[in-house]
Amino acid sequence: MEYPITRLRRLRRTEPLRNLVRETHLEPGALIYPLFICEGEAVRREIPSMPGVFNLSVDEAVKEAEAVASLGIGGLLLFGLPAAKDEQASGAWAEDGIVQRGLRALKITAAAKKLVLIADVCLCEYTSHGHCGIVKQEKEGAFEVDNDSSLALLSKTAVSLADAGADIVAPSDMMDGRVAAIRDHLDEEGHEQTPILSYASKFASAFYGPFREAADSAPQFGDRRSYQMDGANLREAMREIDLDLAEGADMILMKPAMPYLDVIRAARERFDVPIGAYQVSGEYSMLQAAFAKDWLDPERAMMESLLSIRRAGAGFIVTYFAKDAAKVLA
Ligand code: PBG
């Protein structure tokens, strides 16, 4: 039936009508807020390229968790800035590592009962060279991030984070076989109930730029293109997800979000597992830069960006906007 019988504008005329026919909804419980935990006490250091996002010492992280929980946000994704870095990434799996201490402190708060505490599992914040695995020198000047020797350290990291109280472990390194290795070690150490949220589909992206400042994890040489995916490859992303699910991933995370909405949509249609998407640092920073110049309406642009990710098929969204968005949704 065509115009003039059909007039789509009829259902757009008032806010109550628009509310009634809205197809996609956001709620605070579907948002996850990343936290960057650092050494020290009473430290609350703003990240220059990420206005409103901070490096927080453990005591400040606890306060932040309380604020986040009272906004009804679903959970936290924890990253760490260790006091020292080395080739074996010992800060990633040390019993008294920075995230492990953060988890133990968070775990005993009332806020933690309302939040899912997700620990990122990766070595890049803890290695002296800033790569996500063990680096092997091939010949003079040529290096390789070694897959299989990295698995042992990633598994050890996952177990130590579960020991410290992580509700979910989330490997983001993109080594082959890491989900199986982590599942194995978790089960051996009595953590068979700890779910794995795999960053199954993680692209080598320029949009991680500000994060590397936030987590002090920029590679000292080379780049991550030999382990993270080529941004051109949607079919390969489906294979990554297939493999991670076969290895035992309980849920998957797509990353970045806005430049890869088609990949999120394809994953949603193909896989019946919980899917999250990570609106990464660069997505946040570019919007913040436009807000600072008064070029975009902050609230509307923020909500529209999150809605696009949800509409693409993400059940939950990791976002630096979580607190601001939760306030709008309250
Ligand atoms: C660790 C990791 C990164 C991000 C999440 N986990 C950095 C990277 O892969 O370089 C990026 C998150 C963001 O940009 O907000 N490997």
Image (cartoon, grey):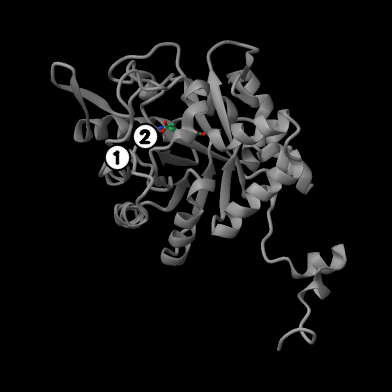
Residue located at (76% from left, 48% from top):
329
Residue located at (49% from left, 60% from top):
265
- SS assignment at label 1: helix
Local crowd at mark 1 within 10 Å, few (<14), some, or many (≥20)? some
| Total numbered badges shown on the rendered structure | 2
Q: Residue furthest left?
A: 139
**Residue under label 2:** 159
Q: Residue furthest front?
A: 3
- SS assignment at label 2: helix
Local crowd at mark 2 within 10 Å, few (<14), some, or many (≥20)? many
Specify the amino acid type for callout 1.
Answer: His
Q: Nearer the viewer, residue 270 or 38?
A: 270
Callout 2–callout 1 Cβ contact below 8 Å: yes
Residue located at (38% from left, 24% from top):
92
Question: Which circle's residue, 2 or 1, is located before the other in the chain?
Answer: 2
Where residue 60 appears, x then y in whole percent? 65, 20
Q: Could you tell me if residue 104 is visible in this image?
A: no
Where residue 32 appears, x then y in whole percent? 59, 42
Where residue 194 appears, x then y in whole percent? 43, 45
**Residue 242, placed above or below residue 36:** below
**Residue under label 1:** 185
